[in-house]
Image (cartoon, rainbow, N blue to C red):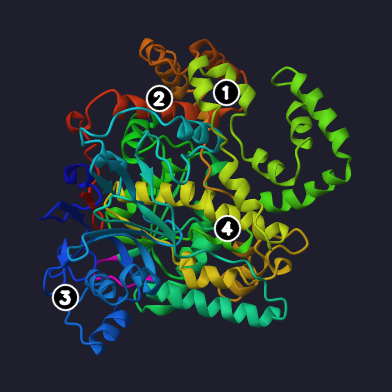
Amino acid sequence: MCQMLVHRGPDEEGVYLGSGVALGMRRLSIIDLEASQQPMCNENRTIWVVFNGEIYNYRELRQALLKRGHRLQSSGDTETIVHLYEEFGPGCVDHLRGMFSFAIWDTVHRRLLLARDRLGIKPLYYAPLRGGLAFASELKPLLQLPEIGRSLSWEAVRHLVTFMATPPAQSIVDGVRKLEPGRVATIEDDLDLRIHRYWDVAFQPDEDASEPELVERLRDLLFESVKLHEVSDVPIGAFLSGGIDSSAVVATMASMRPEPVKTFSIGFPEAEYNELRHARNVAQTFGTDHHELVLQPDVVDLAEDLAWFLDEPFGDTSAIPTFMVSRLAAKHVTVVLTGDGGDELFGGYDKYVTDQEEQRFDRIPRTVRRALGVVGRQLPDGTKGKRFLEHLALDGSRRYLDASTLFRAAQLRKIFQPDAYEQMSAHDPWAHALDCLDRDGCDGLSALQYCDLNTYLPLDILTKVDRMAMAHSLEARPPLLDHKLVEFAATIPSRFRISNGSTKYLFKQAMRGLLPDDIIDRPKHGFAIPLARWFRGELAGFARELLCSERSRQRGLFRTDQLDRLIRLHEQGRDIDLHLWTLVSLELWCRRVLDVPLSSTRRPERASRERILPAVMV
């Protein structure tokens, strides 16, 4: 199990074997390099911990623990968790400010505690076994256990082909689950797994706060968070896309240190996908030690690597540039700060504006909209206006989710074999998101942001960054997702998040004077890649060979004639590259993981390093 995690923790391996428990870890040394080996215990060896992540307020916690009479042997953050547990039991998580997944074994109470950070920055998988429980920071270690089968979770497959990622609590493997963000799980000798949510963000706008007050508070919290996130005993840098979020983080870092910040950017030869000039602008403004790379990746070989390191099938193609910029950064630093989370917190997505505009559809009587939806469903695929009519027929929350849906049910019925489709159709991929959107007490924009903070952010954005950075033994830290900053953002009135159709209004105002105006005011540009063009080039043959092969036919998932039709439609000019990439990702994952024993599968060689890797059996 530990061997599967060398890329996350290349520096050390540690194991603890006790009565009824085995703890293993792989460490990426970042703080207290010499004295914080894991698993770590208290003085009388009754409490043991394995920990993945960083606790940014550990120095403050350490002083408080010393005053309470605790004796700490190291100067790192890991040991504070052990002693906080001694003081507060499972409530220890309430005192932590950071990103983490960890396991504590309490030998006195024979209790295992699993915990995951509030926003889901660090991953944690677990699998109930006969007579116990196994867990790890990735899926691959769990598949080394003979007790865990190799069968697909149809719930996860349905969620994947709907939203390009697997669902919050279920992995792609049947029987292996994910601990959701902001949760603590405990299991004792009765083997009853109890899961408790210890944190949730509450959108409660402070309507009495003035714009200058909010701007000042936002700036203060950003500076505080960046300062905390810079704690490290190894070299640290930052990803720099040239967008407002990463630029704000770099500007804040530059204001706090005498030496230049190391920054890392990538671009593509195609001008419409190349934002390097914006990153250079920021780098020159703040005098960073800037490193950049123009990519012409071998996408076929890269797809094989991604299938391994992403750990589960994954449809978001921005994993490709994230993988490459992580590889670039890892040559120079061990830790990077990122700008992730700004859009979810401050209202930065264009889809929020689109949703506000589409609310006018609700003025049309529902019976009329439903009738137009029936007309749309009867039109042939590809007919102009078909998708719009089907979209128009939906009510508010469902309309928002529909805009982010990759494959609809009618499309899935065509491309999946009948048995596979029947098992997938038993699951509603929208259910969790609808629960978030229908949250009481939230205005329309707050509900959308709350939904994305609980779905898109942890399932897509944070998963992508964690896996792609860890593939290169690089720790990525998102200071915008410090939970104190998140809680503040939830108090910003909606009129200051989106103002007159302008996204991220307050955040932009807070950055005035800190960032160049042309960076603040330029149109948003996602981490896009020329995938559609690639699928009309070398990827077309690769996709056809992969998806329409005899091996794929024997798997019984796809109707390969329909997949060939999708590839031909794309070659003829209809952009369905994300659909094809998601299906390619699923088939590649099946080949790398389901078809062969992982222990005999060669890992891609270019990666290796993270903070620590827990794996446990009780």
Question: Main SS type for the magenta part?
Answer: loop
- Regarding residue 417, the answer to whether it shows in the image is no
Identify the residue under disc 1: 412
Report x, y in % for residue 6: 20, 47
Give the camera-side residue of 62 and 16.
Answer: 16
> In the shown orientation, is residue 265 left or right of residue 615?
right
Amino acid beneath label 3: Ser
Does the stretch in magenta take in 407?
Answer: no
Vertical placement of 472 versus 589: above or below?
below
The residue shown at (40%, 55%) is 195
- For marks 1 and 2, the one nearer the N-term is 1
| Badge 3: residue crowd in 10 Å (few <14, some 14–19, many ≥20) | some
The residue shown at (58%, 80%) is 217
Identify the residue under disc 4: 344
Q: CA distance from mark 1 to mark 2?
A: 15 Å
| Badge 1: residue crowd in 10 Å (few <14, some 14–19, many ≥20) | some
Give the camera-side residue of 233 and 449.
Answer: 449
Identify the residue under disc 3: 74
Q: CA distance from mark 3 to mark 2?
A: 46 Å
Amino acid beneath label 1: Leu
Q: CA distance from mark 4 to mark 3?
A: 37 Å
Identify the residue under disc 2: 587
- For marks 3 and 2, the one nearer the N-term is 3
Amino acid beneath label 4: Glu
Q: CA distance from mark 2 to mark 4?
A: 31 Å
Q: Which residues are magenta?
A: 229-235
